[in-house]
Image (tube, rainbow, N blue to C red):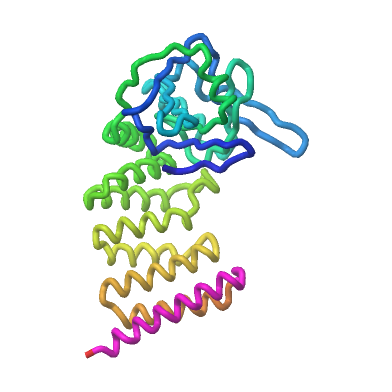
Amino acid sequence: MRIFLLLGLSVVLSTVGQPCRSEASAYLPGSKKIEFKLVSASSSSVSVGPAVAESEDIEDIEVGERNPRVVNFRFKRRSWGKIWNATKVRASGALIVDGKLVTTAEFLHPLFAASSVELDSASLRALLEGLPRTRAEPAPTRAERIRWLEALVKSAPADRLARAELAWKYMDANRAGDARKAAAQWEAVLDGSKAEEGLLDPVDILPFLRECYEKTGAYDRAAARYRKMLESPESELEDVQLRLLLVEADEKRGRRDAALRDLDAAEAALRSSGLPPGFRDEQSALYRKLRERLTKKTASP
């Protein structure tokens, strides 16, 4: 589950984790007006935008018995596209019930199928009071969500956020075939437009891509990708990360001499960087251990 940045109140919004359905109480919105709205703030004012999801978009509202403060709003499938497009922004969101603000959080990833919110006791009572009970229906499966995302990527191939969400879903399966599919999506994200500045930083994506390469043994592909990205890194931190990954890929391919040359380049780049001294010290210690290991392997009969 990916956690959204907290803004004051206790809230978690997730597009990945599914609530425990075997011990959940489910409700319908009933006559209450429930809205998810975007909020923009400046130094002098706060403005609330139009609703990105409303009562009519909500399939049901579930409260887990194991953690009764976590409420899961499950959205109707017909509303997924609308909600996805409305939350593809770096902005704050607000949960509003009958015109009253319940909680806020920052959208760091788009929503589409569900949103899980942690509320305090008073806010939870205010939300659930008077809501009609209903039977908890099965949540959309991972396969259903993947199919929806695959169709979205096919219709909008430049949507890097859709590709990232699809890659995460593929990785959930923890199978080599899905890891290859996930790697292809991560590569497309890295190659695509940077319109969603700040939402998909290469520094955050590279560990996921490395995991996919690791699961499939695609170290030649990994080395080629890292070298390509090193031609125009977007930050010094990305440069450092890429050089370390390249050394690792060389080592995995059994190319110790190449790994040592790349490690020399990594150490030189780190020394000339403007990164914080503490970070440089940590990286230098890591490089020393790498060099010891690579040198030992090279010297072995």
Q: Main secondary structure of the magenta part?
A: helix
Q: Residue at x 59, y 71 (%)?
A: 278
**Foreground: 132 or 146?**
132
Q: Position of residue 296 (x, y in %)?
A: 32, 86
Above or below — where is 267 with respect to 1? below
- Specify the segment rendered in magenta: 274-300
User: Which image quadrant: the N terminus?
Assistant: top left
Q: Is residue 274 left or right of residue 194?
A: right
Specify the farthest residue to the top: 31
Q: Is residue 280 magenta?
A: yes
What is the quadrant of residue 143 in the picture?
top left
Q: Position of residue 21 (x, y in %)?
A: 34, 28
Q: Residue at x 54, y 24 (%)?
A: 124
Specify the farthest residue to the right: 44
**Foreground: 265 or 157?**
265
Above or below — where is 11 with respect to 250? above
Q: Position of residue 95 (x, y in %)?
A: 57, 26
Q: Is residue 230 magenta?
A: no
User: Which image quadrant: the C terminus?
Assistant: bottom left
Q: Is residue 7 left or right of residue 174?
A: right
Q: Position of residue 51 (x, y in %)?
A: 56, 22
The tally of labels here is 0
